[in-house]
């Protein structure tokens, strides 16, 4: 009963935070990767930040529940956050006020779920903005939504779907991590185009232009990220099987399924 009441309370907080997010997400005024400091108008900065709030709360409750149940998984959690920080700090300069880099969020999404990565991601982006001048404080909400919300949710969805369809685990991990990386830059392109639509063609034309700028560097980076994520999970499967079992990495696997 106590556990059920706690879950209901968590859902209430998340739902309450989602209300302003939905309002901003559907309002016409909000038509408005690491987008640089000061590049987005103030209204867009606030809107993207508010849109992230329900995901922050969901991530907080998810991580809290995981750590309460299994304190030993803290090492895996710290490793996932460190992986995101390091790999997303290796940037390749691009034009139009942004840059190309891997995200590293697919690993955490597969291990702990996408909501948890939303909280890890904003912490990483905050430290990068303060310590590395990578991204910015005013654009923190937009960068968080693209890298720590949209990307992880797609990565987790692709991985879960592939496993359900019987795809080998390592192939599923690769596809999830690679497509999650690409999703981040598709969302970033949309964010930039919403703020700066093309005079001819509007948001759609502007989005295609930004995607064309990012694609040459991001496509190979996504493949590299997928491979790196697979390599790390192979190592974890060899040396951290008990911890992986604690977070449910194996619980849905059928006996005899090929990995």
Image (cartoon, rainbow, N blue to C red):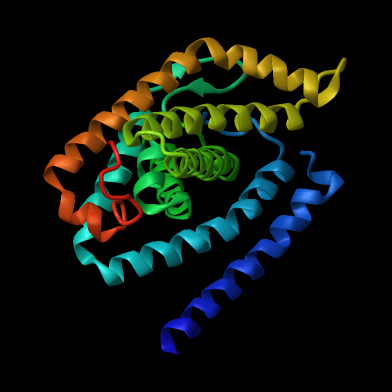
Q: Would you say 45 lies left or right of 98 here?
A: right
Determine the residue positioned at 59% across, 67% down: 14
Looking at the image, residue 167 lies above or below residue 65: above
Quadrant in which residue 224 is drawn: top left
Residue 19, position in %: x, y? 71, 64
Q: Would you say 143 lies left or right of 129 here?
A: right
- Furthest toward the left, the residue is 239
* Residue 85 seen in the figure: no
Looking at the image, residue 64 lies above or below residue 76: below
* Residue 1 seen in the figure: yes
Quadrant in which residue 203 is drawn: top right
Determine the residue positioned at 63% across, 65% down: 17
- Furthest toward the front, the residue is 256
Determine the residue positioned at 60% across, 13% down: 213
Residue 134, position in %: x, y? 44, 31
Residue 170, position in %: x, y? 32, 32
Of 97 and 177, the residue lying toward us: 177
Residue 92, position in %: x, y? 43, 16
């Amino acid at each position: 009963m106590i556990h059920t009441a706690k879950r209901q309370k968590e859902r209430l907080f998340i739902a309450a935070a989602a209300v302003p997010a939905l309002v901003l997400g559907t309002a016409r005024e909000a038509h408005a990767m690491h987008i640089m400091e000061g590049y987005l108008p103030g209204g867009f900065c606030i809107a993207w930040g508010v849109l992230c709030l329900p995901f922050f709360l969901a991530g907080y409750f998810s991580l809290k529940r995981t750590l309460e149940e299994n304190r030993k998984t803290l090492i895996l959690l710290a490793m996932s956050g460190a992986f995101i920080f390091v790999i997303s700090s290796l940037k390749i300069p691009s034009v139009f006020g942004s840059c190309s880099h891997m995200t590293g969020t697919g690993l955490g999404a597969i291990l702990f779920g996408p909501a948890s990565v939303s909280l890890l991601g904003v912490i990483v982006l905050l430290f990068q903005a303060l310590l590395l001048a990578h991204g910015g404080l005013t654009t923190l909400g937009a960068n968080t939504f693209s890298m720590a919300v949209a990307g992880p949710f797609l990565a987790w969805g692709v991985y879960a779907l592939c496993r359900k369809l019987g795809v080998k685990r390592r192939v599923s991990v690769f596809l999830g991590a690679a497509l999650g990386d690409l999703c981040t830059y598709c969302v970033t392109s949309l964010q930039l185009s919403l703020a700066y639509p093309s005079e001819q063609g509007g948001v759609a034309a502007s989005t295609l232009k930004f995607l064309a700028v990012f694609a040459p560097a991001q496509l190979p980076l996504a493949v590299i990220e997928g491979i790196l994520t697979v390599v790390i999970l192979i190592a974890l499967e060899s040396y951290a099987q008990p911890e992986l079992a604690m977070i449910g990495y194996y619980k849905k696997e059928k006996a005899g399924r090929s990995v």
